[in-house]
Image: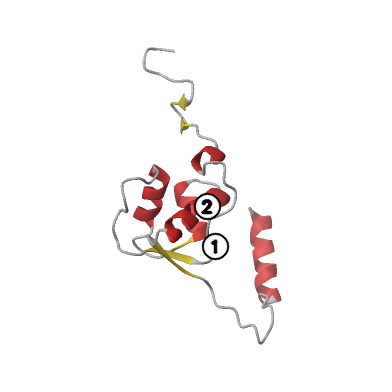
């Protein structure tokens, strides 16, 4: 190892940080449930206060336009659980807004049409 290099830095993968380190050991968000298809949007369009972690700033940058929780996790290359915890932090501080999907409770749980499910299964099999 040359001077200035660390064993926690991999030139191919970048810095290696465990998810629990990013969330401070928390596994559940402080507030909110965060459905996978819920839309997240930056509440004021800004970057937020100075005391946030780099991952918080990355979320604020990505949420300048509405994005789903699942897409956000994918774009940031973070585990979904980590993103949910970080979103809870931002929601608690009023830095983001959540727009949860609306389900018609009078009809009961809605399922996709069987044709759609079969098409998805066939598409996955063809991969």
Residue situated in front as seen by the camera: 118 or 101: 101
Residue hosting label 2: 85
Relative to residue 49, is residue 91 depicted above or below?
below
Name of the residue lying farthest toward the top: 2
Q: At x 45% / y 48%, what residue is drawn?
A: 76
Relative to residue 65, is residue 78 depicted above or below?
above
Name of the residue lying farthest toward the bottom: 106
Q: Which mark is residue 34?
A: 1
Image coordinates for residue 51, horizontal then vertical, percent: 35, 45
Of mark 1 and mark 2, the one earlier in the sequence is 1
Residue 63: name its quadrant. Answer: bottom left
Query: Dot 2: few (<14), some (14–19), or many (≥20) neighbours within 10 Å?
Result: many
Residue situated in front as seen by the camera: 93 or 98: 93
The reply to whether the C-beta atoms of the residues labelled 1 and 2 are less than 8 Å apart is no
Relative to 124, 33 lies left or right: left
Relative to residue 125, is residue 108 depicted above or below?
below
Provide the secondary structure element on which disc 2 rests.
helix
Relative to 120, 58 lies left or right: left
Query: Dot 1: few (<14), some (14–19), or many (≥20) neighbours within 10 Å?
Result: many
Image coordinates for residue 17, horizontal then vertical, percent: 50, 34
Q: At x 55% / y 47%, what residue is drawn?
A: 79
CA–CA distance in space, label 1 to label 2: 9 Å
Q: At x 52% / y 60%, what residue is drawn?
A: 31
Quadrant location of the N terminus?
top left
Image coordinates for residue 18, horizontal then vertical, percent: 54, 36
Relative to residue 15, is residue 69 depicted above or below?
below
Residue situated in front as seen by the camera: 101 or 71: 101
Q: At x 69% / y 62%, what residue is drawn?
A: 121
Provide the secondary structure element on which disc 1 rests.
loop
Image coordinates for residue 44, horizontal then vertical, percent: 30, 63
Q: Which mark is residue 76?
A: none
- Number of numbered labels in the structure image: 2
């Amino acid at each position: 190892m040359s001077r200035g290099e660390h064993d926690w830095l991999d030139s191919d993968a970048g810095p290696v940080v465990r998810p629990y380190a990013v969330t401070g050991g928390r596994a559940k968000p402080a507030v909110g449930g965060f459905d996978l298809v819920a839309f997240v949007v930056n509440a004021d369009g800004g970057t937020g206060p100075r005391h946030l972690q780099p991952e918080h700033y990355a979320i604020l940058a990505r949420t300048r336009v509405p994005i789903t929780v699942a897409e956000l996790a994918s774009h940031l290359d973070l585990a979904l659980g980590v993103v949910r915890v970080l979103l809870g932090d931002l929601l608690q501080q009023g830095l983001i807004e959540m727009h949860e999907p609306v389900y018609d409770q009078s009809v009961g749980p809605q399922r996709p049409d069987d044709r759609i499910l079969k098409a998805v299964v066939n598409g996955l099999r063809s991969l």
